[in-house]
């Protein structure tokens, strides 16, 4: 006859084992379920251009170039480029080159007729998304027909066109506050055909504003295209 203590112990061990299996299986099921809520955003890159003047610039805040393929950027399902074709305004109402709408027309070419060029000095250009959105990433091309660095690049999100409500930085590489917007912790970077992709971490806003102060080739502030990936806020 089995001893009662041994039966109780055997029953307790079996219960613990079953509970452990349930926990492991539950953990294994939850990860794929969470992953299914996200998907890679759709990015279409322009053709690379290998001409132009080699960059002769080194700054203490310049990031090291990375030529590896960019990994997919995962965002909630249904995330799209919500900036495409939206209204654009700027500190330079009469651009030196092109028209404001070129910023979000979906054309990522680098020829002069495809490029927006704002005047010298500290300028901004902004997009009205039409309604509040949760924003997950932006992808920006200043210019990619040659290697350049654009200075004091900053990107803000706000609830109003005047940028007085719910203003948040999502990128700022002005490391010494030259532009007067505050010291940024992001790095300067070299432009190329892949554009600059930045995680916006789901920030909520309706307006996206971009600042710059010239570049390594001239004093103009160029923009080829801006894509903002998000979903309407409920």
Image (cartoon, rainbow, N blue to C red):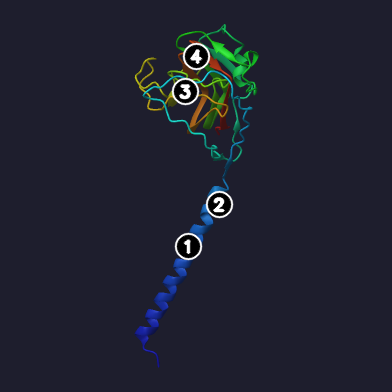
Mark 3–mark 2 distance (CA, rounded to whole Å): 33 Å
Residue 155 lies, with reference to residue 11, above or below; the image says above
Q: Which residue is mark 4?
A: 217
**Mark 4: which secondary structure?**
loop
Q: CA distance from mark 2 to mark 1?
A: 15 Å
Contact between marks 2 and 4 (CB within 8 A): the answer is no
Pointer 4 local density, CA inside 10 Å: few below 14, some 14–19, many at least 20: some
The foreground one among 1 and 234 is 1
- The dot on residue 134 is none
In the orientation shown, which residue stands out farthest toward the bottom?
1
Above or below, 96 relative to 5: above
Q: Secondary structure at mark 1?
A: helix
Residue under numbered circle 1: 24
**Res 202 seen here:** no
Q: How dense is the environment of label 1, judged by Cα within 10 Å: few (below 14), some, or many (20 and up)?
A: few
Quadrant placement of the N terminus: bottom left
Which residue lies under the disc numbered 2? 33
Q: Nearer the viewer, mark 3 or mark 2?
A: 3
What percent of the width, then of the height, locates residue 23? 46, 62
Residue 129 appears in which quarter of the rendering? top right
Which percent across, then down, holds residue 106? Answer: 64, 24
């Amino acid at each position: 006859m089995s001893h009662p203590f041994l039966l109780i112990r055997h029953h307790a061990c079996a219960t613990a084992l079953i509970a452990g299996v349930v926990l492991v299986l539950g953990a294994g099921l939850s990860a794929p379920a969470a992953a299914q809520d996200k998907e890679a955003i759709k990015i279409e890159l322009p053709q690379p251009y290998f001409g132009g003047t080699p960059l002769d610039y080194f700054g203490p805040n310049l990031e090291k170039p990375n030529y590896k393929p960019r990994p997919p950027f995962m965002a909630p399902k249904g995330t799209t480029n919500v900036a495409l074709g939206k209204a654009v305004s700027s500190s330079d109402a009469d651009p030196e080159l092109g028209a404001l709408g070129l910023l979000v027309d979906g054309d990522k070419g680098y020829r002069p007729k495809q490029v927006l060029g704002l005047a010298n000095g500290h300028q901004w250009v902004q997009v009205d998304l039409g309604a509040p959105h949760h924003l997950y990433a932006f992808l920006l091309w200043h210019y990619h027909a040659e290697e350049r660095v654009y200075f004091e690049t900053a990107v803000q999100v706000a609830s109003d066109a005047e940028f007085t409500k719910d203003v948040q930085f999502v990128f700022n590489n002005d490391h010494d506050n030259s532009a007067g917007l505050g010291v940024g912790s992001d790095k300067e970077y070299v432009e190329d055909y892949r554009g600059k992709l930045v995680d916006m971490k789901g920030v909520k806003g309706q307006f996206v504003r971009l600042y710059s102060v010239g570049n390594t080739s001239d004093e103009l502030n160029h923009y080829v295209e801006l894509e903002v990936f998000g979903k309407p806020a409920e």
